[in-house]
């Protein structure tokens, strides 16, 4: 079990309120991802759930029971941080066993859980090594192993992969997703990485300045962002916002169109502009275009290789089925 409910939770440091009253329910077994700009309160929220940070007011319940004043060790949650904080003088086996030794668990049961975690995380051959003899990805797997053996009712991850290189991140991302498929344990995962958020989450929580802007499935947020902030935050490259006469013609203060929903042509189209920079990724070409009325620069994502260079005139046509309309307050109108 691992249903977590936040009721009117607030947090202030001194007289600065970083989390205004916030309500959120995370269902048992759900993979929830917190995203938002740096300083918006993601870690603070996670630490309050873990019990590492007091609430200023409000209430947290775990599986229906009030856990607001329950000490961290009694909450049945396991937290994995960006820095893995392993004990350097202990073997992998002892590092993983540590929380069970502290809990004075039966030795045979400890061994059973270590073997199971090591096997799930491909660490079986490394149990006798010390952390200094492991790669970054292997060390992060040890930290996850140490969390798994506690058999927590929920895992809390605070940017666990951000110290790893790109290839390792992809590998670990898949391992954590597979672990979630297998264990079906509640997971709350903080990340700055768009791909992690979109691919791992059942539910994404978008935060800004301690306020939840929107909660929904990755595709809900991508297809129907409730305001300009979410629209601009979810998706990479970012959604284009077009203001002025072009937006008014669509009955909106601002229209949004994602780079992948605009067709670029060298001969004809609805809008025109001049190529600033073209980024050739091989799989895609990101073209940044100047001079489109109401939107400068406009970014377009063309599939595959699209041959244009700085200064070329191009024509652009948005996919009308994928236009997002916003009012003056930045709220979605259609
Ligand atoms: N111990 C503290 N004392 C005072 N202010 C704090 C403390 N911890 C965090 N804050 C403030 O609370 C706000 C939220 O911080 P938090 O670490 O939760 O942000 P975050 O969303 O995790 O950011 P990042 O993406 O950079 O990790 C920030 O404005 C931060 O400066
Ligand atoms: Mg943080």
Image (spheres, rainbow, N blue to C red):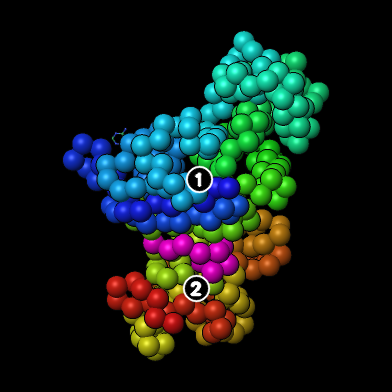
The quadrant in which the C terminus is found is bottom left
Marks 1 and 2, the one that precedes in the sequence: 1
Can residue 232 be spotted in the picture? no
Confirm whether the magenta stretch covers residue 217.
yes
Residue of label 2: 224
Confirm whether the magenta stretch covers residue 201.
no
- x and y percentages locating residue 211 in the rendered image: 34, 56
Q: Looking at the image, which is closer to me, 182 or 257? A: 182
State the residue lying farthest toward the left.
15
Can residue 256 be spotted in the picture? yes
Q: Which residues are magenta?
A: 213-221
- Establish if 139 lies above or below 242: above
Q: Quadrant of ligand 1?
A: top left
Q: Secondary structure at mark 2?
A: loop
- Establish if 305 lies above or below 119: below
- x and y percentages locating residue 128 in the rendered image: 75, 15
- x and y percentages locating residue 162 in the rendered image: 56, 38
Left or right of 60? Residue 20 is left
Please name the residue shown 41% across and 87% down the image: 250
Q: CA distance from mark 1 to mark 2?
A: 22 Å
Residue of label 1: 190
Please name the residue shown 63% across and 36% down the image: 151
Q: Is mark 1 within 8 Å of ligand 2?
A: yes
- x and y percentages locating residue 205 in the rendered image: 47, 57
Please name the residue shown 37% across and 83% down the image: 252
Mark 2 neighbour density, 10 Å: few (under 14) some (14–19) many (20 or more): some
Left or right of 217? Residue 205 is left
- Establish if 205 lies above or below 129: below
Q: Secondary structure at mark 1?
A: strand
Q: Looking at the image, which is closer to me, 196 or 259? A: 196
Left or right of 323? Residue 69 is left
Residue 137 occupies quadrant: top right
């Amino acid at each position: 079990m691992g249903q977590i409910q936040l009721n009117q939770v607030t947090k202030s440091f001194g007289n600065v309120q970083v989390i205004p009253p916030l309500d959120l329910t995370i269902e048992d077994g759900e993979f929830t991802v917190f995203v938002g700009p740096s300083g918006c309160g993601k870690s603070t929220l996670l630490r309050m759930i873990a019990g590492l940070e007091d609430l200023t007011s409000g209430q947290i319940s775990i599986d229906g029971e009030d856990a607001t004043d329950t000490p961290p060790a009694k909450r049945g949650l396991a937290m994995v941080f960006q820095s893995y904080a392993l004990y350097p003088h202990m073997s992998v086996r002892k590092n993983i066993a540590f929380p069970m030794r502290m809990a004075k668990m039966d030795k045979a049961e400890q061994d059973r859980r270590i073997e199971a975690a090591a096997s799930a995380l491909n660490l079986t051959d490394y149990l006798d090594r010390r952390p200094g003899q492991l790669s970054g990805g292997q060390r992060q797997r040890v930290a996850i192993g140490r969390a798994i053996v506690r058999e927590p009712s929920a895992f809390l991850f605070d940017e666990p992969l951000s110290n790893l290189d790109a290839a390792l991140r992809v590998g670990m991302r898949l391992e954590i997703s597979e672990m979630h498929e297998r264990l079906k344990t509640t997971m709350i995962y903080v990340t700055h990485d768009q791909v992690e958020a979109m691919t791992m989450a059942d539910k994404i929580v978008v935060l800004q300045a301690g306020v939840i802007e929107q909660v929904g499935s990755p595709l809900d947020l991508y297809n129907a962002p409730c305001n300009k902030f979410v629209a601009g935050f979810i998706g990479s490259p970012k959604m284009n916002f077009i203001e002025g006469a072009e937006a008014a013609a669509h009955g909106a203060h601002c229209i949004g169109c994602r780079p992948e929903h605009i067709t670029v042509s060298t001969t004809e189209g609805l809008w025109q502009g001049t190529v600033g920079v073209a980024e050739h990724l091989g799989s895609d070409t990101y073209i940044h275009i100047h001079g489109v009325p109401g939107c400068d620069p406009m970014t377009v994502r063309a599939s595959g290789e699209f041959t244009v260079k700085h200064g070329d005139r191009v024509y652009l046509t948005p996919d009308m089925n994928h236009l997002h309309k916003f009012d003056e307050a930045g709220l979605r109108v259609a």
